[in-house]
Amino acid sequence: MFKNPVINRILSALFTLWLISVISFIVIQLPPGDVVSNFVRQQELISGASVPPETLEFLRQRFGFGEPVYVQYLKWIAGFPKGDFGFSVIYDGAEVADIVARRIGMTLLLAILALFLSWGLAIPLGIYAATHKNRFSDYLMSNVALFGLSIPDFLMAVVYLFIAIFVMGSDYTGGLFSEAYVDAAWSVERFWDFLKHLAVPLLILSIGGMAGTFRIMRANLLDVLGQQFVETARAKGLRERVVIYKHAARIAINPLISRLGMQLPVLLNGTIIISIVLDLPTLGPPFYRALIAQDMYLAGTVLMLLAVILLIGNLIADLLLAWSDPRVRDG
């Protein structure tokens, strides 16, 4: 469309976001009923009293669900440039922006820390396994990585809870703070308690990403070590450590950088899922409740947020790839 690739990339990203917003809005509307009727039904089950039809209609008009679907979508999407994402019925009309703002920080913190941990362990382990091919350590790490890829995050969280409560006798039931520190002001003791609770979800989130990154790094490096430029570097008398880390590993890591743009949203999804199991103060529990109740403003906003992070992650991955590989930058 335009000769400038940056402009084309921005226009493509905007079109993708618009398309995701339409699809998300339609999918959330597909189940029968609406957020008001589902919310009222839940309240009836709790209280045991039925809500008159006129009250139900009043609530629909109050929250804007009496209008056609396309009007609801246009009102929702029109507020995005102003930071107005609508309101949540299941949270008693609270602003969606406020709900997301209170929980997005912890969600991103968990995902980013898990990304750094998984890469920080997987890359050196992958290099070690490739340079010690067919040894016991290589077989051991490869089988552990296969185990990590085979078990979903939420299942590992359930298994951990079972072991912690029924085997080890712990009173841990989830969360990132002990009961004494949930509403306390920040202090050294509260921060230490937070770190102790953070270790469990962080490790669970990191296992899957670490296993996949390890396997890719090992396979890529094995392929690169057999190429001619590596043999040439060795023939020049360079030390093996220089050949591996300065020449071979730098080429082998390029596919991982391309994968980076997809890995952060995957970790965010994992954070949301295990947050439901471990009751973490992230976007997971509100997002789950919004999907069940068809709270389209809250659920749609979280989906849009994940899409934005995916696009930003892909852009960062492209920039890092151009920085690390001169062939991409010059091309």
Image (cartoon, grey):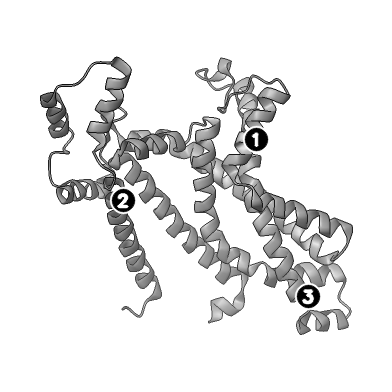
Residue at 24 percent of width and 50 percent of height: 77
**Which residue bears the numbered disc 2?**
27
Residue 97 placement: quadrant: top left
**Foreground of the two, 94 or 28:** 28
- The quadrant of the picture occupied by the N terminus is bottom left
**Which residue bears the numbered disc 3?**
225
Measure how far apart labels 2 and 3 are at the Cα level: 48 Å
**Which residue bears the numbered disc 1?**
159
Left or right for 317, reference 68: right
Residue at 35 percent of width and 72 percent of height: 8
Report the amino acid beneath label 3. Leu
Measure how far apart labels 1 and 3 are at the Cα level: 39 Å
Of tags 2 and 3, the one toward the viewer is 2
* First reached walking from the N terminus: tag 2 or tag 1: 2
Q: Secondary structure at mark 1?
A: helix
Q: Residues within 10 Å of mark 3 (few under 14, many from 20)?
A: some
Q: Position of residue 293 (x, y in %)?
A: 32, 35
Q: Secondary structure at mark 2?
A: helix
Q: Position of residue 286 (x, y in %)?
A: 40, 34
